[in-house]
Image (spheres, helix red, strand yellow):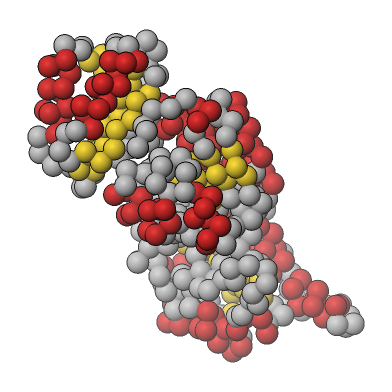
Amino acid sequence: MKTSFPKKDIKIVLLEGIHQSAIEVFHDAGYTWIEHHDKALPRDELFKAIADAHIVGLRSRTQLDAEAIVQARRLLAVGCFCIGTNQVDLDQAHDRAVPVFNAPYSNTRSVAELVIAEAILLMRRVPERNAECHRGGWSKSADGSFEVRGKTLGIVGYGHIGTQVGVLAEALGMHVIYHDIEAKLALGNASAARDLDDLLARSDIVTLHVPATPQTAGMLGAAQIARIRHGAMLINASRGNVVDIDALAAALKSGQLAGAAVDVFPKEPKSRDEEFASPLREFDNVILTPHVGGSTQEAQLNIGTEVAAKLVRYSDNGSTLSAVNFPEVSLPEHPGSSRLLHIHHNVPGVLSRINDVFSQSGVNINGQHLQTDGKIGYVVIDVSASETQSEALREQLAAIPGTVRTRLLY
């Protein structure tokens, strides 16, 4: 497989209507072979499109599983233009020396704003009144309607989004408490709850901002929901498997909860043609949104710029900082040097064999960087050598036992 090529020969396939900002980043960096698709492709068309692609960009609908990654025989890197990476087989990509990048923070503000908006709408009972007006009713009453000022917002998961929600909530005069499995520095006047049960019991509104992990799956089941203060509200804009939907529906039906807003679900339609099914559809006091917490033009622009920049930096420079499945290396520029990348199985003796190649060739190493994880080692070597000599060095490096992939950057 050819491993050294000018930028014009690097094929980039972008799927699912990735924002124009990504294309601009690639163009500005000198990449011109860009294939852009407005939607996710059927599986056979996907395989055809990525068969000779060096870089693939996708969002949440495209499934880049092990079979798909094998089909992409020239694949160098994958960009998930979203927060999650569950749609990519990270182990298969890792084993084939393909780093995967995402944008974990670019839509933080968009999600936080939606949560605050939903908190206000729920406290004012707008969902029910809106539904009634659509049916021709006119229930003009202050019963059950409250300001958010002075109320307590409980944030479960005090990370980038959770802290933003807290800052916005305090600006509205809310009291903010939070719970996180790690000790976190409070922003503003927020304070840590003793534990999750303490937060659930004290909050007028509970909002969830946790990642998808084995520990968070089903973390709010019937027992936990029963501990939420009677008449409180629940907002979930984190992951669909965090809340037991049937238990939530039961709590809404019994009046234990006065309302909810849900943006993520255990099973979500794969397209607009598939019906959205959920027991929550029967409740007027529930705001249901189709996983759009981060779906704003500002967020998509930021995501396009962030992920494309990471892909360009890896392709141009070899840097893997913030890759989710690969040893992370932040590399300086290499003016006046050729840069060789060597990715290998993490076994003893490989680095000494790499250095032997340069020693026996009489080539001085200007700089060397090494990072490993449990299975993969990533070595970056800068040398002063001609193009022909550098390519010969790369071929020798490729012949070292345990080598997974080599690349040459000029």
> Closest to the observer: 20 or 124?
20
**Residue 351, position as x, y percentages in the image:** 15, 30
Determine if residue 164 is in view: no
Question: Which quarter shows the C terminus?
Answer: top left
Determine if residue 1 is in view: yes
Q: In this rendering, is residue 22 above or below 72? A: above
**Residue 358, position as x, y percentages in the image:** 17, 18
Residue at screen point 29% across, 12% down: 385
**Residue 202, position as x, y percentages in the image:** 50, 69
Residue at screen point 59% across, 71% down: 269
Question: Which quarter shows the N terminus?
Answer: top left
Q: Report the label total.
A: 0
**Residue 286 is drawn in which quadrant?**
bottom right
| 280 relative to 132 in the view: left or right | left
**Residue 334 is drawn in which quadrant?**
top left
Q: In this rendering, is residue 273 above or below 17? A: below
Residue at screen point 36% across, 50% down: 93
**Residue 13, position as x, y percentages in the image:** 55, 44
